[in-house]
Structure formats: C-alpha cells, structure tokens
Image (cartoon, helix red, strand yellow):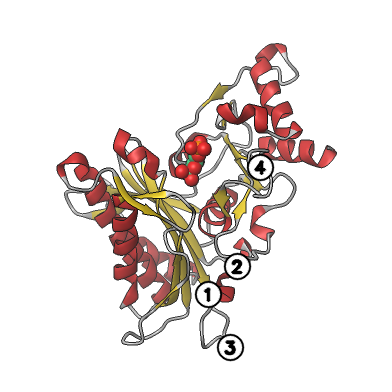
Amino acid sequence: MSQKVSLSRYLVEEQRSKGMIPAQLRLLLEVVARACKSISHAVNKGALGDIMGSADIENVQGEIQKKLDIIANEVLIEANEWGGHLAAMASEEMETIHLVPNRYPQGEYLLMFDPLDGSSNIDVNVSIGTIFSVLKKAEDSDSISEKDFLQPGLQQVAAGYCVYGPQTTLVLTVGDGVAMFTLDREQGSFVLTQENVKVPEDTKEFAINMSNMRHWDAPVKRYVDECLQGKDGVRGKDFNMRWIASMVADVHRILTRGGVFMYPWDKREPHKAGKLRLMYEANPMSWLIEQAGGAATNGRQRILELQPSQLHERVSVILGSKNEVERITRYHLEK
Ligand code: P6P
C-alpha cells in the first residue's frame, strides 16, 4: 500500500522542492488545520453536544449567529494567537480586526476567515465549512490596522477551506496548484488524497439560488434561461442544477467534477455588490478555482484583481469551469 502523506510532510516537501512555504507559513497552515480538526469534532457532535441552534446574537453582517459560528471563531482565534506567525486576524464574525495580544510575538502574516460558512445548514445536517485566506503584512507596517488587510486577492500567499461533510476534507493552495487532504480520524491527521486538482473547462451543471430569478440582472437570466432550454436551445445540451446553500460544499463539488457557481448582484439590495464577502469567501475560493484551471469574475472583472475598500465588503461571484464563466462574463460585458 502506498505510504500515506500527511499534511505536515506535504508542506515540508513542497518547501524543499518549490521553496513556497517558509517555516512560519507552514506553522500557520498546520495550526489552521488543527483548528479545523477541532471544529470538525464539534460539528460532528450535532445534537449530542450543546452546540446546535442559534446563539441569539447578531453579527456584523446583521445575521443571527449560530452557537457553532461563535465556537468556530473562538477556536481559530485561540489556536492562532500564540504561535508568533501572525500579526493579526479578521473574521466574518468580528466587526474589527483582532490584533495578536502583546504578550505574544508578532509574525508577518495576516489571516482572514469565515469560521463556519453555510451555518444555516448546521441544524439540518448539511455540509458546512471553514474558509481561510492568508496575506503578508507590508514590510514597513508596524502598527497593524484594517488597511493592511485591504489587498487584492492576487496578493494571497495561501488559501483554502475545510469542508465538514461525509468526509472532513482540507483543500489548500499556496500558488502551486490545489491539493486535498482527508481527515483520518483514527490517526487524527489530514492525509493527502488528491493533488494537482483540475476543474474541467466545460460543464453541464450550474449552481444558483433559483428563487431569486425575478431579481437577477439580464445577463444572468439569459445564461440560466439558455441552460434550462437544454439540448433544444442554443447550448445544444441539457444541464443539471445544484444549490446546497453552503458555498464550501458547492465549490468542493466544482473542484471535484466541474460546474459553475453564481451568487450574482440582484435587485433585492441594489446598493450591495452581492451577498458573498470578498476578503474571506470570494478571494480564497477564486484563487483555489484559478489554481485548478477554472475562472472567477464578478461578472465583469477577475475577482482576484479587485481592490478592496473595506474589510467586510461584498461582491458578485461567478466561478468554476472556465468556458462557462467566460460565457457569463461575456454576456455581462455585451450588456
Ligand atoms: P442563500 C451561506 O449563508 C452563504 O454565505 C454561502 O455559503 C451560500 O452559498 C449562500 O450564502 C447561500 O445563500 O441566499 O441561497 O441562502
């Protein structure tokens, strides 16, 4: 039987062969992976632990937090504070950035995360996940502030997610392709189960919340209508549809078998660019998709090139199989 490659061994060998994972970044990724293991353990308890349901607290997004949202956020904060690899953290669940306490040494990395994406699915036992993105602080930056985080997605040095589903799988890129690690619960470690992940350039599967159809902009409606016309329409093939309402699960399916995911701007809240957050949802997922040969735009621009103006800003997201994303983007640019 071929020897199992642990996450730690993968990171060491990647550094040895490609020089892309310096020791502090390796420590960061191992700490985040351990935090995800703890979150997976809490999620898997379900109703057996006092962790289901709402915490009856509203977060910065105006959403009522689930108990597990708070638990996951605290696990990530506590795991990353003491290691000396971070300067600061930012989370979907916290209005402002979280500086590493003075009692610990400061590092050069900035960590952003959505601690538990898709948490509306917790109580119905549907896959959820943790999304994370890593940036480097500017060399000359001594007092860290929110503006240190406002870097385009192209500046990321690592990004990934951990999906808590039938398997707990960590998916990671440091800019040298995408690798997947499945949690071996007997050993308690993440084991490499796929590398050089590739998203097929074409697909017959789209993901969007169809209940918002009447609110979509014309290019999105045109694209979805053509998919629904199937082989008798301009696309000449039938399409399937999936919507898990958990971005991590939908993106994992696309990285595994292709597809296109859309959460576009719509007329419900026209002043908002979209529902999903740029810094800790769209940017890490877009980099993973691009590293696997896919594409990611906001309908008009490459997501990774967008210059953020605030920590929790939202963005329209169209990502997945390259040829589908290019078609949808073309429809937007023709409008
Ligand atoms: P809707 C989960 O709340 C999330 O942020 C993403 O994970 C998911 O893709 C989307 O929102 C689901 O939104 O409007 O379909 O419930």
Observer-nearest of 335 and 50: 50
| First along the sequence among labels 1 and 4 | 1
Q: Which numbered disc flags the more N-terminal residue, 4 or 2? A: 2
Q: Residue at x 77, y 39 (%)?
A: 332
Q: On the image, numbered disc 4 is attached to which residue?
A: 265
Q: Residue at x 68, y 33 (%)?
A: 216
Which badge, 3 or 2, comes first in the chain's sequence? Answer: 3
Residue extending farthest right: 334
Quadrant of the image occupied by residue 140: bottom right
Query: Which residue is labeled 3 in the image?
Result: 140
Q: CA distance from mark 4 to mark 3?
A: 37 Å
| Amino acid type at image mark 2 | Gln
Dot 4 and dot 2 residues touching (CB under 8 Å)? no
Question: How far is disc 4 from disc 2 in space, using C-alphas?
Answer: 25 Å
* Callout 1 touching callout 3 (CB < 8 Å): no
Q: Residue 136 got which mark?
A: 1
Q: Quadrant of the C terminus?
A: top right
Label 4 amino acid? Trp
| Identity of the residue drawn at 26% across and 46% down | 43
Residue 155's disc number: 2
Mark 4, mark 3: which one is toward the viewer? 4
Q: In the image, which is nearer the foreground, mark 1 or mark 4? A: 4
The three-letter amino acid code for the residue at tag 3 is Asp
> Would you say the beta carbon of the disc 4 residue lies within 8 angstroms of ligand 1?
no
Q: Nearer the viewer, residue 26 or 142?
A: 142
Disc 1 packing (10 Å; few <14; some 14–19; many ≥20): many
State left or right for residue 186 relative to residue 321. left
Left/right placement of residue 322 relative to residue 253 reads: right
Cβ–Cβ below 8 Å for labels 4 and 3?
no
Q: Please indicate whether residue 294 sits to the left or right of residue 187 in the image.
A: right
Q: How much space separates mark 1 and mark 4, taking CA atoms?
A: 30 Å
